[in-house]
């Protein structure tokens, strides 16, 4: 259902509030530059600092502005199962194509708890679910056997995974345990090339926020099995992938976007603060390497 370059969009702020005008421009720019789907209210969108009303408005604006040109995968994750269901219910009504649901963070559920959480969501809403595994942030790891069990239990509901575990062997684990129809998306830009080689079909990307055309062209080259071109593009993007995490994300990314667009700010919400001078230098060098400035 989903493939290619899928940016996990930043949420622009101005004077403490959601900058809806800038967000609409960002959505248009992403679509015009080849992004195949969009993810509002993910980790990069600072979803954990948004009120539920803000969270829902960001999703609503994204769906409205995309206007059917690309599908919207709404960030619906929460460490509270009922709140995740609330986000899913709103996203379904708003016209989102799927929900991105992160493993519950802080609570540290067992694998049985993860199965119960995602089963409840699958059974109480019709929106397809893409699991989001990022144990570096959540502590909880959705193990391959759990992914396979959920996908077999709910084949029409749990349709894919964004995997940011850093363990490339899992692409093969999932493919062999579930089948080729299960949508595997890298959650780490720097691992997208080997993940695609192993059977992934795209990336939910941080870097694509600031380099949408390069990321889209890279994913297209992978889809066409043009390894030479894919490697060339990956080499252009590689320093930028790492620069995005020189400081707490999405600080470096928001700074990078100010280098490319004068209608965006680098404003973050506490406890995040603007990225360090060291991070800015790394971003500047990576943008220059990629030919973006």
Image: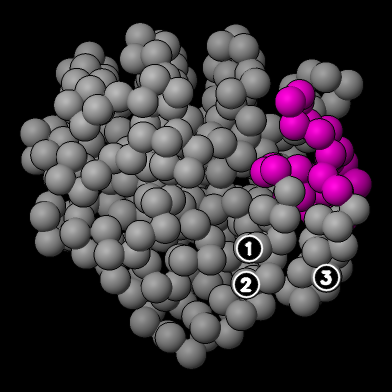
Crowding near the residue tagged with mark 1, few <14, some 14–19, many ≥20 C-alpha atoms within 10 Å: many
Specify start and end residues of the magenta stretch as a single range. Answer: 248-276
Task: Determine if residue 147 is in view.
Answer: yes
Q: Which mark is residue 220?
A: none
Q: Are marks 2 and 1 in contact (CB under 8 Å)?
A: yes
Residue 185 x/y as whole percent: 38, 54
Write the residue at 36% across / 35% down. 140
Q: Is residue 233 left or right of residue 37?
A: right
Q: Is residue 195 magenta?
A: no
Q: Name the side, left or right, on which 97 lies relative to 280.
A: left
Give 153 or 79, whichever is nearer the viewer. 79
In the displayed image of the protein, which residue is found farthest to the bottom?
228
Tell me if residue 149 comes above or below residue 34 in the rendering: above
Q: Where is the C terminus found, in terms of image quarters? A: bottom right
Helix, strand or loop at label 2? It is helix
| Residue at horizontal 36 percent and vertical 26 percent from the top | 108
Is disc 2 in contact with disc 3, using a CB cutoff of under 8 Å?
Answer: no
Compare residues 213 and 84 and report the one nearer the observer: 84
Task: Label 1, secondary structure: give it.
Answer: helix
Q: Which residue is mark 2?
A: 238
């Amino acid at each position: 259902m989903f493939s290619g370059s899928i940016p996990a969009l930043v949420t622009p702020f101005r004077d403490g509030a959601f900058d809806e005008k800038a967000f609409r421009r960002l959505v248009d720019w992403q679509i015009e530059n080849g992004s195949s789907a969009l993810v509002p209210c993910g980790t990069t969108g600072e979803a954990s600092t948004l009120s539920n009303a803000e969270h829902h408005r960001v999703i609503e604006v994204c769906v409205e502005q995309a206007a059917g040109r690309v599908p919207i995968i709404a960030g619906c994750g929460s460490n509270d199962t009922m709140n995740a269901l609330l986000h899913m219910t709103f996203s379904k009504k708003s016209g989102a194509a799927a929900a991105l649901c992160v493993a519950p963070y802080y609570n540290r559920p067992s694998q049985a708890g993860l199965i119960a959480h995602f089963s409840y969501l699958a059974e109480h809403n019709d929106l397809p679910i893409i699991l989001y595994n990022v144990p570096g942030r959540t502590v909880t790891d959705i193990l391959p056997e759990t992914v396979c069990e959920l996908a077999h239990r709910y084949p029409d509901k749990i349709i894919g995974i964004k995997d940011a575990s850093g363990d490339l062997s899992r692409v093969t684990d999932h493919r062999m345990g579930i089948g080729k129809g299960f949508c595997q998306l890298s959650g780490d830009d720097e691992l997208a090339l080997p993940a695609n080689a192993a059977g992934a079909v795209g990336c939910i990307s941080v870097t694509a926020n600031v380099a949408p055309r390069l990321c889209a062209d890279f994913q297209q080259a992978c889809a066409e099995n043009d390894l030479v071109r894919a490697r060339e593009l990956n080499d252009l993007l590689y320093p930028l992938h790492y620069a995005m995490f020189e400081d707490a994300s999405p600080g470096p990314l928001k700074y990078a976007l100010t280098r490319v667009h004068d209608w965006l700010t680098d404003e973050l919400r506490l406890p995040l603060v603007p990225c360090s001078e060291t991070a800015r230098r790394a971003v500047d060098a990576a943008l220059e390497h990629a030919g973006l400035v």
